[in-house]
Structures are given as structure tokens and as C-alpha cells.
Image: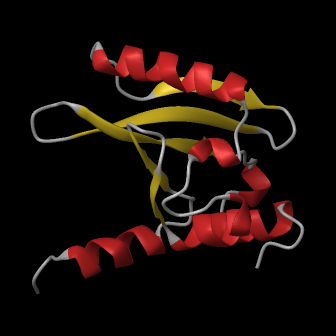
């Protein structure tokens, strides 16, 4: 089997967490299947991330990018009290270590009784209208 762009895309689409990859200019360059379902029209491919985030978010993201440029990798961003998720800023680097973009990783809360519930089912329960 040849590992090519289609295989990588299939892998990312199989991942049950949303992935929205944003370049250094804050332009959305990629969304996996979960992200497309979860965010719908709120996040536009090839549009600015700040069409759905406010100015405060821009300041925070720029600070995370500075830290990433100084060598930090995944950074804790916030605990979302509304969803119970921890959110992390994840820089993406090229082969030379230069930060080419970023995405936000959400850590889904779970309890022992629901440990076997697939993440995709968590999103279905959590988000009204998520299909």
C-alpha cells in the first residue's frame, strides 16, 4: 500500500476528534470530517479563523504562537466549563522545526461508567443538531 495524501486524509477523517488546521496567517487550511460536522458553516475552509473567534482569542493565539516559536509544544489553553473539556493549543512544525500552523485539541471528559462510549457518540450526545 502506498501512503499518500488520500490515505492521510482517510486517517484524519477516521479520528473522532475535530481537527481544524490553521496556518500562520490564521487561515483555515484543513478540516477533518468530525470538524466539518461539528462546526458546519461556523468555520469556513480557506477563511479566517477569526470569522468565528473574537479579538481576545486572537491575542491568546498570538501569545501561544510566540511560545511555540520559542520551542514549546502542546500548551494548555483552557478548561471549558460549559462542555467539561480541557483545550490545548497544538503547534504544527515543518521538517526544520518552524511552526507552520496550529490546531486546538479538545480532551473529552469521561467517567468510569462511560469509558467504553466512543468519542463520536459523545459528540452526538453533547451537541444539539450534530449529525
Q: Is residue 6 above or below residue 26?
A: below
- Which percent across, then down, holds residue 49? 58, 46
- Which percent across, then down, holds residue 81? 84, 32
- Snapshot quadrant of residue 29: bottom left
Q: How is the image coloured?
A: secondary structure
66 vs 2, left or right, is: right
- Which percent across, then down, holds residue 1? 11, 87
Residue that appears at 50% across and 56% down: 19
Residue that appears at 54% across and 73% down: 33
Q: Nearer the viewer, residue 110 or 25?
A: 25
- Which percent across, then down, holds residue 79? 72, 28
- Label count reads 0
Q: Is residue 110 above or below residue 122?
A: above
Q: Locate the C terminus by quadrant.
A: bottom right
Residue at the farthest bottom position? 1
82 vs 120, left or right, is: right
66 vs 94, left or right, is: right
54 vs 48, left or right, is: right
Q: Nearer the viewer, residue 16 or 104?
A: 104
| Residue 117 in sight | no
- Snapshot quadrant of residue 2: bottom left
Residue that appears at 40% across and 68% down: 12
Q: Is residue 29 above or below residue 10?
A: above
Residue that appears at 50% across and 32% down: 89
Q: Is residue 56 above or below residue 3?
A: above
| Residue 18 in sight | yes
Amino acid at each position: 500500500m502506498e501512503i499518500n495524501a488520500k490515505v492521510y486524509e482517510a486517517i484524519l477523517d477516521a479520528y473522532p476528534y475535530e481537527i481544524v488546521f490553521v496556518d500562520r496567517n490564521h487561515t483555515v487550511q484543513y478540516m477533518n470530517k468530525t470538524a466539518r460536522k461539528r462546526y458546519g458553516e461556523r468555520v469556513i475552509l480557506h477563511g479566517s479563523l477569526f470569522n468565528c473567534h473574537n479579538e481576545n482569542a486572537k491575542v491568546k493565539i498570538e501569545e501561544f504562537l510566540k511560545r511555540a516559536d520559542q520551542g514549546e509544544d502542546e500548551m494548555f489553553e483552557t478548561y471549558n466549563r460549559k462542555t467539561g473539556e480541557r483545550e490545548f493549543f497544538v503547534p504544527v512544525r515543518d521538517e526544520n522545526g518552524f511552526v507552520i500552523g496550529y490546531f486546538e485539541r479538545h480532551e473529552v471528559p469521561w467517567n468510569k461508567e462511560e469509558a467504553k462510549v466512543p468519542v463520536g457518540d459523545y459528540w452526538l450526545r453533547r451537541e444539539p443538531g450534530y449529525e
